[in-house]
Image: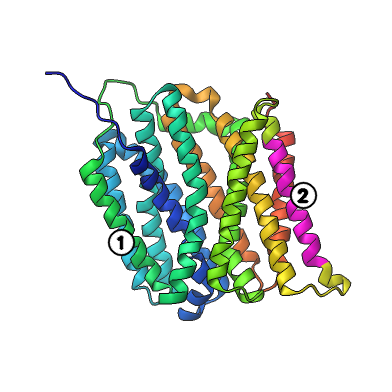
Amino acid sequence: MSSVILLPAIWLIILIVGLPQLSETVYTPSLPDIANGLSTTESMVESTLSIYLAAFAIGTLFWGRLSDTYGRKPCVIIGLLCFVFGCVWCYYSTTIYLLLAGRFVQAFGGSTGSVLGQAICRDAFDGPELGKVFALLGSALAIFPAVGPIIGGFIAEQYGWQAIFLFLIAVASILICLIFVLLPETLKKQNQIIPSTKAIWYLLSKDWHVLGLGFIVAACNGIMFSYFAEGPFYLISLLQLRPTYYGLTFILVAAGTLAGGITSRYLHRFFNGTRIMQYGLYIICFSSFLFSCFVSTAFLGLALSNKVLIFVTILSQLMVSFGICMATTNALATALIEYKWCIGTASALFGFFYYCLISAFTFGMAWLHNGTLYPMPFYFFGLGLAMILVARSIVKTT
């Protein structure tokens, strides 16, 4: 009796990977309303994104290791059920502390989509086909976080912020049913030596090349998630942009990300990944510097209108997202080249490392929040300078 290996549908993998990315940002347009509704500070509400990322980092380690024993499919289903429970918790939250706890549970369960979606790809595909699948996943990772505020802005304005979690419950429930019916188990049971997590962690912790690239990946994502957290207060509360319009601005952010990916692929004809990564960092730093200069015109007695500042903010973030895509894709591609012999465990540990830093950088934005226009552009410029210094002093050139 011959066995037939069933390949998972690519569109289903994209949905599995995309849901937690969507959940990270879909409620950001309603952050000012949440602060008012729960009678808490804006900084505390921004911390709901930081705690989401911290729980995501923990879940990356947990679900990856668990799925090596019990299989990908059951762990994805259990993780998404945990995600749904977290969404229900968030929906019924009446204080900011309950919402923070609900977001932690939500992220811990949702992280299964990110880590196991990639594991399913590595299980089922090889060679050039694997590269094509990861290219599609990369596009999804660029689109889902940008689509989230568009959807969330509409839902929040029409039905209130709690309805966003009902939307996530519905989407996750449909996805669980699709996975139960359509997703085959891709884990191949075979006798192999599983590398010691502790030993690999020790190797990675001494590798300044990997740590430096992890810092760059984290700082780039820290800028993006800080924008997701601070942007609603910046554009909606301070510059009086409607939540629906705020959500639509992320079409431009997504366009910048996609353009950065296309440009990066083209530049590979002439330059190596390290050089392209550095070009991306220069674009991030230059864009955030100009952003800071425009915001600082108030110190010179020049009062720019809200419309001008909105335009400058969105244009700057478009350019920053362009540079971030160039920097992160190449940093991720070159970070673990020397760890192919233990790529699964190394990837999980590397992801845990940079997600912890992303959470810290996002918390830094919340800590600096003071209800003015100044912290965000200067914070982005500071992170841009730090990444350039790391790239020059620690990251090896190839």
Q: Residue at x 29, y 38 (%)?
A: 72
Q: Quadrant of the N terminus?
A: top left
Q: Residues within 10 Å of mark 1 (few under 14, many from 20)?
A: few
The quarter holding residue 63 reads top left
Q: Residue at x 77, y 60 (%)?
A: 292
Residue at the spot of label 1: 170
Q: Quadrant of the C terminus?
A: top right
Percent x, y for residue 306?
A: 71, 73
Residue at the spot of label 2: 286
Q: Residue furthest right?
A: 300
Q: Residue at x 33, y 73 (%)?
A: 92
Q: Nearer the viewer, mark 2 or mark 1?
A: 1
- Residue 198 in view (yes/no): no
Asked whether residue 6 is drawn in magenta, I would say no
**Over which residues does the magenta segment extend?**
277-296
Q: Report helix, strand or loop for mark 1.
A: helix
Q: Earlier in the sequence, mark 2 or mark 1?
A: 1
State left or right for residue 185 relative to residue 220. Answer: left
Q: Residue furthest top?
A: 1
Q: How many marks?
A: 2
Which secondary structure dominates the residues rendered in magenta? Answer: helix
